Image (tube, rainbow, N blue to C red):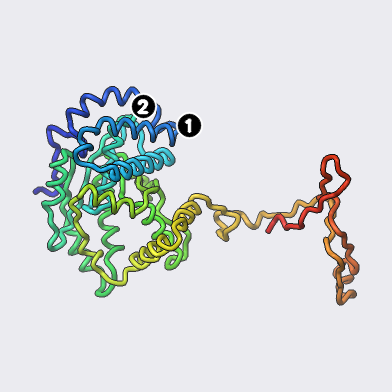
Amino acid sequence: MTVATLLTPQITPELGVNSRDVDVNHQAEQAAIDAMLYDDSDDFKDSSADFMDEQTDNSLADTQAMTETAEFRKLQKKLRRQVSWAIRDFNMIEDGDVVMVCVSGGKDSYTLLDILLLLKRIAPIHFDIVAVNLDQKQPGYPEEVLPAYLNEQGIAHYILEKDTYSIVKSVVPEGKTYCSACSRLRRGSLYGFAKQIGATKIALGHHRDDMLATFFLNLFHGGALKSMPPKLLSDDKQNMLIRPLAYVEEKDIIEYAQLKEFPIIPCNLCGSQTNLQRAIINDMLREWDDTHPQRLASIFKAIQNVAPSQLADRELFDFEALTLDRDDNERLFEGDNIQAGQVESLAEIGLPVMPATQIFNPNFAEVEKGSRTSQKIPTINPVL
């Protein structure tokens, strides 16, 4: 096999789809769902997702009736919705894009490729998908598994061969984890290759739980509030990275991969190392998910709902420019009494030695319609 081998079958049916069904149904599907998948309207999520479910379920009915259970169809429908929402929310894929899907042989990248190929069939825009795998020459790596799978499914792909394994082993001190060095080398190779073949987007298989784990790794060990963004422009502005699985939970991917029986290739380089901080964080997240099912969803929502003025980043919010803008309305202390001590010192500062009190502030009182009874409003500091 050459350093970069392109395998493009003459007949390329989509993953898990009969090619005859694609030809028969493609034109009708395209016309029917025009302006839906990436539509910006508020009702997009329900209308497009439901229509996608109906059209895809119909076109695959014969095959699914034989090979898939209702459980699988329900899960696949959920993943299709979540991926399509992420694509829409972050404008991940546009008309004419060539999406390079990085496939490692793990459950995440298999699922990403499978769902994107499914969505490609029904999208109202045209985009192409090419799978790319980097064979890092790890000892014992079953290099025949992934090409065999991609050929069997009729998916255009490249297998890149580069011995980054030896480089990682030589530069990482004994006892240290390989992940950081391995990731940098792999990323550099894939970035350059994407530009070489003209791919406009690089799709990675990171899911919601990966993003949360990265958030806590940076929080606990990096001193920063940051995570993996769903869409990222590389530092040199040469490549655009997308993470279409950003809304997908890992447990759903695990179940989907099991039902699809993907030929999983385990990572024997870093995955076998002990005391990985990411593994510890993942265990923490799984424990939280078991005991508090909504906690991870709430944390992920927080990542999407940042309040810069409530943090302490001086670059993100201009604290120095904050100034008072008080009006003439006097709000007296609502209570029974005020005791003033060291009155001379208070007077010297220019503060009142006998501040007035009131039972309630009339400016905040409401009179019920048709009644003479005033309703007292509880005193709450609106700033706090």
Question: Given contact means CB atoms under 8 Å apart, are the residues at marks 2 and 1 in contact?
Answer: no
Circle 2: residue type: Ile
**Other-residue count near label 2 (Cα within 10 Å), few / some / many at <14 / 14–19 / ≥20:** some
Q: Secondary structure at mark 2?
A: loop
Q: Quadrant of residue 7?
A: top left
Q: Work out whether residue 138 or residue 65 is closer to the camera in this orientation and state it.
A: 65
Q: From this viewpoint, which residue is outermost toward the bottom?
A: 342
The residue under label 1 is which amino acid type?
A: Ser
Determine the image quadrant of residue 74.
Answer: top left
Q: Is residue 125 visible?
A: yes
Looking at the rendered structure, which numbered label has been put on residue 41?
1
Residue furthest left in the image: 1
The residue sitting at 26% across, 57% down in the picture is: 185
Place of residue 182 in the rendered image (x, y in percent of width and height, measured from the top left): 26, 61
User: Which element type, helix, strand or loop, lies under badge 1?
Assistant: loop
Q: Horizontal placement of 60 versus 229: left or right?
A: left
Position of 281 relative to 344 (above/below): above
- Nearest to N terminus: mark 2 or mark 1: 2
Q: Residues within 10 Å of mark 1 (few under 14, many from 20)?
A: few
**Which residue does the image show at 21% across and 67% down from the upper left?**
169
Looking at the picture, how far across and down is residue 156, in whole percent?
18, 39
Residue that carries the numbered disc 2 in the rendered image: 33
Indicate the quadrant containing the C terminus: top left, top right, bottom left or bottom right: bottom right
Query: At 48% from the left edge and 59% from the top edge, which residue is drawn?
Result: 225
**Residue 195 seen in this snapshot:** no
